[in-house]
């Protein structure tokens, strides 16, 4: 079995993702803010190097706007999958 990390090669904070979801979806996202949990890393990025080397894989969507918009469109087209 082969395991690969897939990502855009750059990170976004939870706040940045929530703000983008609010912009794309046109709705407020209710938040409960808390501290980092024990064991949570301060930064977490997917290393896409192995997938690039072994599979020739490159992300098609690398901006947070495109990633969130694509996910939003997918879920909106399939409301039965979003429950």
Image (tube, rainbow, N blue to C red):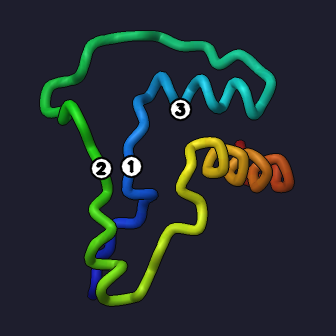
Is the residue 21 above or below the residue 74 in the image?
A: above
Left or right side of 71 for 49: left
Query: Which residue corresponds to the image point at 28% horizontal and 84% vertical from the top-left?
Result: 2
**Depth order, front residue of 81/64:** 64
According to the picture, the residue beneath numbered tag 1 turns out to be 10
Q: Marks 1 and 3: CB-CB under 8 Å?
A: no
The span from disc 1 to disc 3 (Cα, nearest Å) is 13 Å
The span from disc 3 to disc 2 (Cα, nearest Å) is 14 Å
Whichever of labels 1 and 3 marks the residue nearer the N terminus, that label is: 1
- The crowding category of the residue bearing disc 3, from other C-alpha atoms within 10 Å (few below 14, some 14 to 19, many at least 20), is some
According to the picture, the residue beneath numbered tag 2 turns out to be 45
Q: Marks 3 and 2: CB-CB under 8 Å?
A: no
Is the residue 37 above or below the residue 64 in the image?
A: above
Q: What element carries label 1?
A: loop
The span from disc 2 to disc 1 (Cα, nearest Å) is 7 Å
Q: Marks 2 and 1: CB-CB under 8 Å?
A: yes
Foreground disc of the pair 2, 1:
1
> In the figure, residue 74 lies in which quadrant?
bottom right
**Depth order, front residue of 27/58:** 58
Query: Which residue corresponds to the image point at 18% horizontal and 35% vertical from the top-left?
Result: 41
Is the residue 44 above or below the residue 16 in the image?
A: below
Name the residue at the left extreme.
Answer: 39
Left or right side of 53 for 55: right
- The crowding category of the residue bearing disc 1, from other C-alpha atoms within 10 Å (few below 14, some 14 to 19, many at least 20), is few
Query: Which residue corresponds to the image point at 53% horizontal and 13% vertical from the top-left?
Result: 31
Q: Where is residue 39 in the image (x, y as percent from the top left)?
A: 13, 33
Q: What element carries label 3?
A: helix
**Depth order, front residue of 77/14:** 14
Q: Position of residue 78 (x, y in %)?
A: 82, 55
> In the figure, residue 33 lies in which quadrant?
top left
Which label was assigned to residue 17?
3
């Amino acid at each position: 079995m082969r395991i690969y990390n897939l990502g855009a090669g750059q990170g976004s904070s939870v706040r940045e993702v929530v703000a983008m979801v609010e912009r794309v979806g046109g709705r407020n996202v209710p938040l409960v803010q808390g501290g980092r949990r024990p064991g949570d890393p301060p930064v977490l990025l997917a290393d896409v190097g192995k997938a690039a080397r072994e599979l020739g894989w490159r992300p098609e969507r690398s901006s947070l706007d495109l990633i969130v918009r694509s996910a939003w469109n997918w879920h909106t087209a399939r409301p039965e999958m979003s429950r």
